[in-house]
Image (tube, rainbow, N blue to C red):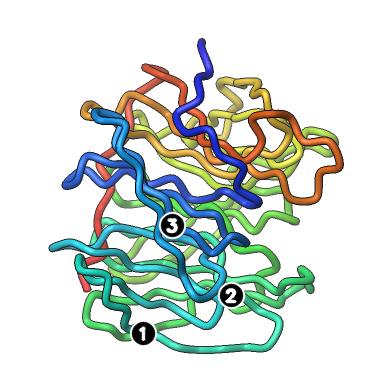
Amino acid sequence: MSVEVAVRESAQLGEGPTWDAAAGRLIWVDILGSRVHTYEPGSGRRTVLATEQHVGAAKPRTGGGLVVNLRDGVGSYSPEGAFTWLHRDPVPGRRGNDAAVAPDGALWAGSMAYDETPGGGNLIRLAPDGSVETVLDDVTVSNGTGWSPDGTLMYYVDTPTRRIDVFDVEGERVTGRRELATVEEGAGFPDGLTVDADGCVWVALWDGAALRRYTPSGALDRVVPLPVRRPTACAFGGADLSDLYVSTARVGLNSPSPLAGSLLVLPGVGRGSAQASYAG
């Protein structure tokens, strides 16, 4: 299994790779660099959008443009680059972190305190009609969120717990939170995740230099070593969703590896599920 460099970069906190099928591009962010990056595998074309605040995640919108999870809330960029706030909720010492779009087109956006104060973050659901609901309000580092291929389960990571949790999806709500798997001490911390077409959960291990794949029953199915200490998230992309892209970070490392902060790719490693765009 080969690990290649898709984009050589020195992002401080690369995060949130997302495949934008309509545009044939991979979107990812450098949170602390306040940058949204795009990469087109077919042409090699790249773009970089500077945001005015730290940006935890960027996702495609139906009809074009981006929805972004910023320090003070959720905003959007039109295809022409015009910015609009969709949900502004500034809290001193808090910023947006990872986010994901549900099959129904709603954005689930997490947050965290800069100093990682326990319970300092939350997880909200921004519906396509613009209404907002707080789903979880006692979160420390809100991270990976994803759905099973049939949309009946939602997976979620609050990183310091070391757990990947699973919920039942009932319409617009999630219930029955329970543990899918726990990453043992010394193996790193679960960060961003994606769910493949088989319903298995791939998770990046911060400080673990690896990706893991868990089956729907929670069994550890595969471990993929990586040449960076701090992989942050992963997502399938490419025309047939068979390439797994991995964002990485170099923040906090005294001697980061040469590839820390780059966007990596594992060609042909599996088969992903189609990802929704924010429908608002």
Labels 1, 2: front one: 1
- Would you say the residues marked 1 and 2 are in contact, meaning their CB atoms lie under 8 Å apart? no
Foreground residue among 134 and 41: 41
| x then y, percent, for residue 224 | 60, 21
Identify the element where label 3 is drawn: strand
Identify the element where label 2 is drawn: strand
Tell me which corner region of the image, top left, top right, bottom left or bottom right, holds residue 219: top right
Mark 1 Cα within 10 Å, few/some/many (few <14, many 20+)? some
254 relative to 87, above or below: above
Q: Residue at x 38, y 21 (%)?
A: 270
Earlier residue among tags 2 and 3:
3
State left or right for residue 13 relative to residue 273: right
Labels 1, 3: front one: 3
Q: CA distance from mark 2 to mark 3?
A: 22 Å
Give the numbered dot on residue 138: none
Give the numbered dot on residue 122: 2
Give the residue at mark 3. Answer: 36
The residue under label 3 is which amino acid type?
Val
Foreground residue among 186 and 91: 91
53 relative to 41, above or below: below
The residue under label 1 is which amino acid type?
Trp
Mark 3 Cα within 10 Å, few/some/many (few <14, many 20+)? many
Q: Residue at x 50, y 73 (%)?
A: 70
Foreground residue among 169 and 223: 223
Give the residue at mark 1. Answer: 85
Q: Residue at x 67, y 63 (%)?
A: 141
224 relative to 46, above or below: above
The residue under label 2 is which amino acid type?
Asn
Identify the element where label 1 is drawn: strand
